Image (cartoon, coloured by chain):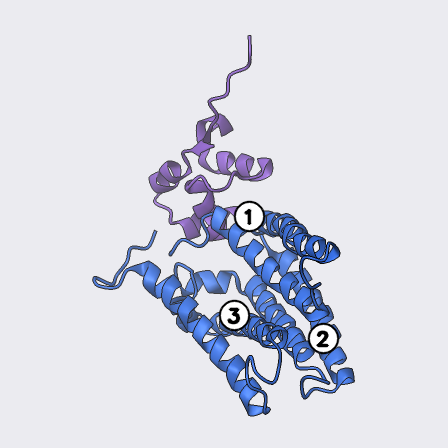
Chain colours: A blue, B purple
């Protein structure tokens, strides 16, 4: 294992905390900036559903871009991605390139749908093209990523899928149950879509964390 | 499941990356096996044992005993 070469900054700070905080800040700032530029204020003119969906979509886009750019330039990527060195990024290039692009496309799909008319500025037909196109193309790109994965990543993928199914049942099912009984308003379609994204991401974090893959390397 | 993968890898003077390359898996897989976060498939366990020239039970330790 590579030892920490920095005498002052712990590796988990440079490999996990800083990238996570940077991603959160950049994602939020980009989402808020995008909404502001097109004349919509976060949690103002547009509803919470749109704001949250845009933010979640931007997190996917930023994460996907970080993975894609880090893989394209391994020396730079090794500084902020949780890998041992640049060679590990080169070894995983086939998997990471397609999965990074898939995340970007999935993020674009959600942002496009979140900003759809009449609440947002994107015409509904264009939003449908972005949403459906992004989801389908992203899924098509995820297939080669899965095929190029080794057995650990395949196991993690399967576990994440099972966890996501359980989380969706728990969260969306509970919400639907409360709505059915009149204790809460039912989820809007965009909220449902956002929940699928969030719970899928959460399941991935849990599955990778259980395999020790979130530990700084 | 406990294993002695790290012991045998280091005895050969190989890095995790070198072992991963020889086995055709990712470094993350080697790291996850060595830290007991992942039990490899039977084919991979057999390849590991063959690579180090030891039986699988020498590499992976299961303390289970059959009931009498």
Between A97 and B44, the one nearer to me in the picture = A97
Q: Quadrant of residue A144?
A: bottom right
Identify which residue, A31 or B34, lies in the foreground: A31
Q: Position of residue A158 (x, y in %)?
A: 63, 49
Query: Which tag is nearer the camera, tag 2 or tag 1?
Result: 2
Residue A100 horizontal side relative to residue A14, left or right: right
Residue B25 visible in rendering: no
* Residue positioned 41% across, 49% down in the render: B16
Which circle, 3 or 2, is nearer the viewer?
A: 2
Look at the image and tell me whether residue A52 can be seen.
Answer: yes
> A131 or A86, which is in the foreground?
A131
Q: Are marks 2 and 1 in contact (CB under 8 Å)?
A: no
Among the 4 quarters of the image, the one containing residue A61 = bottom right
Callout 3: residue from which chain?
Answer: A
Could you say whether the residue bearing mark 1 is in a helix, strand or loop? helix
Q: Which of marks 3 and 2 is nearer the N terminus?
A: 3
Asked if labels 3 and 2 share a chain, the reply is yes
């Amino acid at each position: 294992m590579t030892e920490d070469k920095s005498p002052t900054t712990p590796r988990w700070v440079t490999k996990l905390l800083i990238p996570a905080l940077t991603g959160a800040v950049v994602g939020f700032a980009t989402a808020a900036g995008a909404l502001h530029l097109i004349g919509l204020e976060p949690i103002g003119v547009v509803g919470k559903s749109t704001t949250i969906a845009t933010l979640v979509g931007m997190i996917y886009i930023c994460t996907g871009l970080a993975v894609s750019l880090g893989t394209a330039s391994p020396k730079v990527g090794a500084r902020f991605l949780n890998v041992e060195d640049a060679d590990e990024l080169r070894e995983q290039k086939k998997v990471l390139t397609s999965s990074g692009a898939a995340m970007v496309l999935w993020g674009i799909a959600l942002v496009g749908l979140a900003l759809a008319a009449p609440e947002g500025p994107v015409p509904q037909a264009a939003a449908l093209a972005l949403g459906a196109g992004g989801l389908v193309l992203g899924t098509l790109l995820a297939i080669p990523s899965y095929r190029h994965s080794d057995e650990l990543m395949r196991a993690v993928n399967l576990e994440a899928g099972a966890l996501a199914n359980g989380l969706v049942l728990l969260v969306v099912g509970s919400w639907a149950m409360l709505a059915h009984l009149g204790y809460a308003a039912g989820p809007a379609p965009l909220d449902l879509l956002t929940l699928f994204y969030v719970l899928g991401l959460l399941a991935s974090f849990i599955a990778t964390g259980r395999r020790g893959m979130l530990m700084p390397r | 499941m406990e294993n002695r993968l790290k012991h045998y890898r280091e005895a050969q003077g190989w890095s995790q990356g070198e072992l991963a390359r020889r086995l055709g898996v990712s470094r993350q897989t080697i790291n996850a096996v060595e830290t007991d976060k992942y039990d490899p498939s039977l084919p991979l366990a057999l390849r590991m044992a063959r690579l180090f020239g030891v039986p699988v039970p020498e590499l992976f330790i299961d303390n289970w005993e059959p009931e009498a």
